Amino acid sequence: MEHGSFQDQTASTFSLADEDHTLANSVRFALNQDPRVTFCGYSIPHPSDARVNIRVQTTGDPASEVLKDACQDLMLMSQHVRSTFDQAVTDFKNAQALNSMNIKDERK
Amino acid sequence: MAKVPIWDLPDVPKGELPPHLELQRTRVLCNSDAPTHTENIQYSGAYASMGVDNSVRLGQFQNNFKVEVIRVTEDDMEFDMIGIDAALANAFRRILIAELPTMAIEKVLIANNTSVIQDEVLAHRLGLIPIKVDPRLFDYMSENDVPHEKNTIVFKLHVRCERGGPRLTVKSDELIWLPNGSEFPLEAANLTSNSTSKPKTYTSFRCSQDSLPEFSENPIGLKYPDITIAKLGPGQEIELEAHAVKGMGKTHAKWSPVATAWYRMLPEVVLLQDVEGEKAEELKNKCPKPCNVFDIEDVGNGNKRAVVARPRACTLCRECIRGEGWDKYVALRRVKDHFIFTIESTGALPPEVLFTEAVKILEEKCERVITELS
């Protein structure tokens, strides 16, 4: 849900239901990396509601576009984390299997 | 006066941060009184006045990000995540603890309990027992759902301590999986229906769970057979049925797939000047035994010098910088983008699978926001 004005789309507050610091803080991080963002922050209005408000103010682009890009960036980053992690685990397990076979050099 | 190009003046932006700012940006300084520069400078324009772009481009992130696995066993693992912001590392940790589903006992139908342990305490204890089953094979049970073979696992427990015998300890291996669902008849329903048909029970399984391909090979069981559930005196008896459903750690900790998941930033121990002779010996002894960060190196002519041998083992207890003047010799720091991540699984899924699932959940969250916005 977006709270903003039609005249000025560069500043909006986005209210996300069923989310918490997990997503909001990551999105804030991604938004902060974007040079188009002049201000961003998030708040949880009440601890017993599962809801976060994310405020985005930009240098000119519509805030919703910038937020969408931030989410896209975050998603690509996560994908990269996942593939790197999977690769590292496979490599580690292969190395471990090789070590446990305890191959001795017969030539000595 | 000779002409000096403007870029050679000492106070002109060079496109890189001066060393002291670079240190503040990348390290937490652990001083003897309090840590300083603990915050992460996230804003892309934070160093604009120095001509430094602080934004992280995706390609740059992909080049710098590294994962190094230290240890993987059946139910715990340790790995280093290098080149990532705390916001993301913390998101993964939070998802691991609170948002990955598992199966846990939620409903307990107690037919008989004459033991000293109260029904509700017994039910709570049962809930916390880890079940060894892949939660991805099950659906969530919503409010109007009837319990069936895709959303419920049923266990029964029937133990009795005979009179005249010794007291009995009920262990978790007494819980027996019922692949056909509940065996307790639903009284209200059976009164109206005719007596020849199969009696209605508390679950409505369409088929036996052990006939499903995913469970016929590896039957559902508990992770540990030796968890004490209750103790019975002579003549006491417990008869019950436990229904496990899918849930998430944010509802109740019994659904958390990890005993815990945590990270710490890599400690960095720097000797600011050479520590030699007796001083080196003193430094080595100042460091508590289990950490034993420093070693003594022989530099010839009977001279000794302290070296940092095991910075990873440092707990940042600051014992080495206690006392007058020691902070001139040793600096303790933490590397802000190097996380030593540890995951202890409770047994439903192996730890490496838990982490990939956690990352997938963050991706799904982003995707949800994107679809909501477009």
Image (spheres, rainbow, N blue to C red):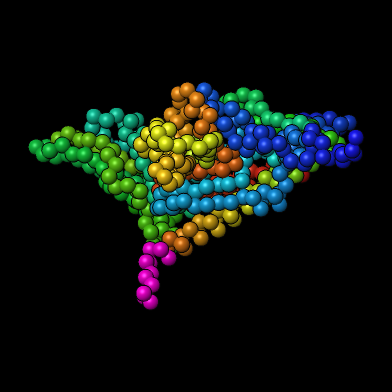
Residue A17 vertical placement versus A94 (above, below): above
Residue name at image x 72 percent, y 47 percent: B57
Prevailing secondary structure of the magenta residues: loop
**Does residue B177 show up?**
yes
Residue name at image x 21 percent, y 39 percent: B169
Q: B298 and B169: which one is in front?
A: B298
**Does residue B332 show up?**
no
Residue lying farthest to the left in this orientation = B164
Q: A82 and B153: which one is in front?
A: A82
Asked whether, in this view, residue B193 is left or right of residue A65, the answer is: left
Asked whether, in this view, residue B323 is left or right of residue A9, the answer is: left
Residue name at image x 54 percent, y 35 percent: B272
Q: B166 and B25: which one is in front?
A: B25
Highlighted range, magenta = A98-108
Picture coordinates of residue B316, whole percent (x, y): 47, 33
Q: Quarter of the image containing the C terminus of chain B?
A: top right
Picture coordinates of residue B349, whole percent (x, y): 45, 51
Q: Quarter of the image containing the N terminus of chain B?
A: top right
**Count of marks placed on residues:** 0
Q: B114 and B65: which one is in front?
A: B65
Residue lying farthest to the bottom in this orientation = A107
Asked whether, in this view, residue B84 is left or right of residue A10, the answer is: left
Picture coordinates of residue A54, whole percent (x, y): 70, 32
Picture coordinates of residue B171, whole percent (x, y): 26, 42
Q: Is residue B314 magenta?
A: no
Residue B211 vertical placement versus B168 (above, below): below
Asked whether, in this view, residue B343 is left or right of residue A82, the answer is: left
Residue name at image x 26 percent, y 36 percent: B230
Q: Is residue A101 magenta?
A: yes
